[in-house]
């Protein structure tokens, strides 16, 4: 059952061919056998089996929905009541939240069974899953390479068939880039579509939660379960949630206007394997009747530098809450209050987190604020306006998700700026707040390549429809990594 | 703009981070590289461009000024490193 989609599993459950308890047991066994991938930080077999029994009972009563009884995993950034939520950090190594995140609540209410919490870059800061306090995650396609990040554990878990789906968060590419590097499908919804309540905050004007799975149809099913208004997130948008599967099914590639940004197609430093796979993908869209045309996003090249001012600035503010007083790591025997703060934070945060806190602190400090933060916010508007102009003439924008396929563990770990450039095609989307997804589009040197599709605000239905249409004429999303024992 | 070890020390103090001497030097190198990278923003003409703080340009939602949260002090303090009589404990601040 491990290589089936949610849609297929739901049908099998409905026909009585398997039970949720069986699916959940299989997931737990597969997670144990694949422990070398290090995809999970915490596995919760007991509560999972209890939830699975409840799901089977609900189905017997005729109360099953499309997610009832389907095992899933949550990125360890989502607060789970009574289950340790580490955010990949020593700071939260022993943190057991007293409440559930909105996404956790909603997916549980929809009947999904949570089997555990997946590994991630510390505080979601990273593009390789190597900054986790709990160790790097390995890419199931080639265990010498990274799975991408920050939702690397979720991506590896889905790619290896440990669970059919997992949640992620995407601040600069953290769903799409690992989805690309592990050959799965991942969606970052429009900013504000999914509540941020109970997600450990990184950069609040950019953070957004979304699903990771093995098909666009599964993403639609999961988004249906996750989206919705929540007053506890002040930037959650109060707007009706459409029927995403119906909108997806109602989207035709024939006549769909697809824009290819010249700046993405001509970017330097893109692997040849990525370029050729993405060209083939756009040709497949053309062959299916899409009207593919070149567009321009003149300020796209500024997105990464804008992000590396704004995201660290917001992070330095958000992470000031970790003070060793109320929850989280506290140093031993502090001399005084300042020593308590400084050593708790100095010992509790890893290097990349400290680096970003310091960049943010510097960018926001008196005398530098206008030159860095003010300037970045102005350029952020230019990036957003580029997209607005593009969407006057196209329905979706297509291009590569990441400039390279999965890179070797350790290759970029010592060079922060090189690592930041892994997100060169994904970051502009977060700055503008648009929805975007990555779907598998072939291989370069045997490693998966992702095709990124970007939609207009709240146009997830059509975006998923374009991806689903592509998956009807290709089978890259059906490819699975070779089994390694 | 290059950042030296002394400036890293000042920034770390502002951010309330204790960092070791060798780490300070490594951070000076990394922060200089990152700031050098973001300084390409200076070349963009932003004359008259309004800053964008939020992608959907939302304004803060308001609600009626009524209590919505129950008192959950005991539950929340159960996860604190040190408490006593309903208070969070920190090292002595006043001699």
Image: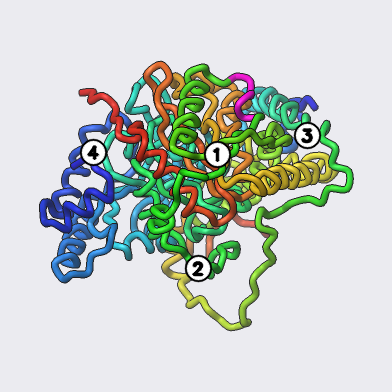
Give the residue number, with chain letter if any, for mark 3: B41
Based on the picture, tell me whether residue B83 belongs to the magenta stretch.
no
Which labelled disc corresponds to residue A240? 2
Near mark 1 (Cα within 10 A), the count class, few <14, some 14-19 or many ≥20, is some
Asked whether the viewer can see residue A344, the reply is: no
User: Circle 3 marks a residue in which chain?
Assistant: B
Front label number (3 vs 4):
4
Q: Which of the two labelled residues, at mark 4 and mark 1, occupies the earlier sequence position?
A: 4
Q: Nearer the viewer, residue A275 or A43?
A: A275
What is the chain letter for disc 2?
A: A
Residue A437 rendering spot, x and y as whole percentages: 48, 42
Query: Is label 2 or label 1 in front?
Result: 1
**At 60% from the left edge and 30% from the top edge, which residue is drawn?**
A420
Q: What residue would you read off at disc 1?
A: A291
Pointer 3 and pointer 4 on the same chain: no
The magenta segment? A263-269
* Residue under disc 3 on the same chain as residue under disc 1: no
Same chain for the residues under marks 2 and 1 in the image: yes
Q: Which mark is residue A450?
A: none
Quarter of the picture holding the C terminus of chain A: top left
Which one is closest to the eye, mark 3 or mark 1? 1
Up the image or down, A364 lies above or below A483; here it is: below
Q: Secondary structure at mark 4?
A: loop
Residue of label 4? A3
* CA gap, disc 2 and disc 1: 30 Å
Residue at 21 percent across and 37 percent down: it is A30
Cα separation between marks 3 and 2 = 38 Å
What separation in Å lies between label 4 and label 1 (alpha carbons)? 33 Å
- Residues at discs 3 and 1 in contact (Cβ within 8 Å): no
Spatial distance from mark 3 to mark 1, Cα to Cα?
Answer: 34 Å
């Amino acid at each position: 059952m491990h290589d089936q989609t949610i849609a297929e599993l739901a049908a099998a459950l409905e026909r009585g061919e398997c039970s949720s308890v069986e699916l959940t047991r299989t997931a737990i066994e597969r997670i144990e056998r694949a422990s070398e991938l290090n995809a999970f930080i915490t596995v919760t077999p007991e509560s999972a089996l209890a939830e699975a029994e409840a799901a089977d009972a609900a189905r017997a009563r005729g109360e099953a929905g499309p997610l009832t009884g389907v095992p899933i995993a949550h990125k360890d950034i989502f607060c789970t009541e009574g289950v340790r939520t580490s955010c990949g950090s020593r700071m939260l190594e022993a943190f057991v939240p007293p409440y559930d995140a909105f996404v956790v609540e909603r997916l549980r209410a929809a009947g999904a069974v949570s089997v555990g919490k997946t590994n991630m870059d510390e505080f979601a800061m990273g593009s390789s899953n190597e900054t986790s306090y709990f160790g790097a995650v390995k890419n199931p396609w080639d265990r010498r390479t990274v799975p991408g990040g920050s939702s690397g554990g979720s991506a590896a878990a889905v790619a290896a068939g440990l669970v059919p789906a997992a949640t992620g968060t995407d601040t600069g590419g953290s769903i799409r880039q690992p989805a690309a590097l592990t050959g799965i499908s991942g969606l970052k919804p429009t900013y504000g579509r999914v509540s941020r309540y109970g997600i450990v905050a990184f950069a609040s004007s950019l953070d957004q939660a979304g699903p990771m799975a093995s098909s666009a149809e599964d993403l639609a099913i999961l988004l249906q379960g996750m989206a919705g208004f929540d007053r506890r997130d002040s930037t959650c948008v109060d707007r009706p949630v459409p029927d995403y599967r119906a909108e997806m099914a109602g989207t035709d590639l024939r006549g769909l206007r697809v824009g290819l940004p010249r700046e993405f197609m001509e970017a330097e430093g893109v692997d040849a394997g990525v370029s050729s796979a993405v060209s083939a993908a756009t040709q497949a869209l053309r062959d299916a009747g899409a009207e593919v045309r070149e567009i321009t996003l003149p300020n796209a090249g500024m997105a990464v530098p804008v992000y590396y001012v704004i995201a660290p600035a917001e992070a330095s503010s958000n992470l000031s809450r970790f003070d060793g007083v109320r929850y989280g790591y506290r140093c031993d025997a502090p001399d005084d209050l300042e020593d308590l703060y400084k050593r708790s934070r100095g010992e509790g945060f890893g290097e990349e987190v400290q680096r970003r806190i310091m960049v943010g602190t510097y960018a926001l400090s008196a005398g530098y604020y206008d030159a860095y933060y003010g300037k970045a916010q102005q350029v952020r508007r230019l990036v957003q306006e580029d997209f607005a102009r593009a969407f006057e003439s196209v329905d979706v924008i297509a291009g590569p998700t990441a400039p390279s396929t999965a890179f070797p563990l350790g290759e970029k770990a010592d060079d922060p700026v090189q690592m930041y450039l892994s997100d060169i095609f994904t970051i502009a989307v977060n700055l503008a707040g648009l929805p975007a997804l990555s779907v598998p589009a072939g291989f370069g040197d045997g490693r998966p390549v992702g095709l990124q599709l970007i939609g207009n605000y709240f146009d997830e239905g059509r975006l998923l429809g374009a991806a689903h249409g592509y998956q009807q004429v290709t089978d890259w999303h059906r490819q699975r990594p070779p089994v390694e024992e | 703009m290059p950042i030296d070890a002394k400036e890293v020390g000042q920034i770390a103090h502002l951010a309330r981070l204790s960092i070791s001497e060798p780490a300070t030097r490594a951070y000076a190198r990394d922060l200089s590289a990152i700031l050098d990278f973001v300084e390409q923003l200076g070349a963009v003409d932003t004359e008259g461009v309004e800053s964008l703080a939020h992608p959907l340009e939302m304004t803060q939602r308001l609600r009626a000024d009524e209590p919505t949260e129950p008192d959950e002090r005991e539950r929340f303090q159960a996860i604190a490193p040190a408490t006593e009589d309903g208070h969070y404990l920190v090292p002595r601040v006043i001699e």
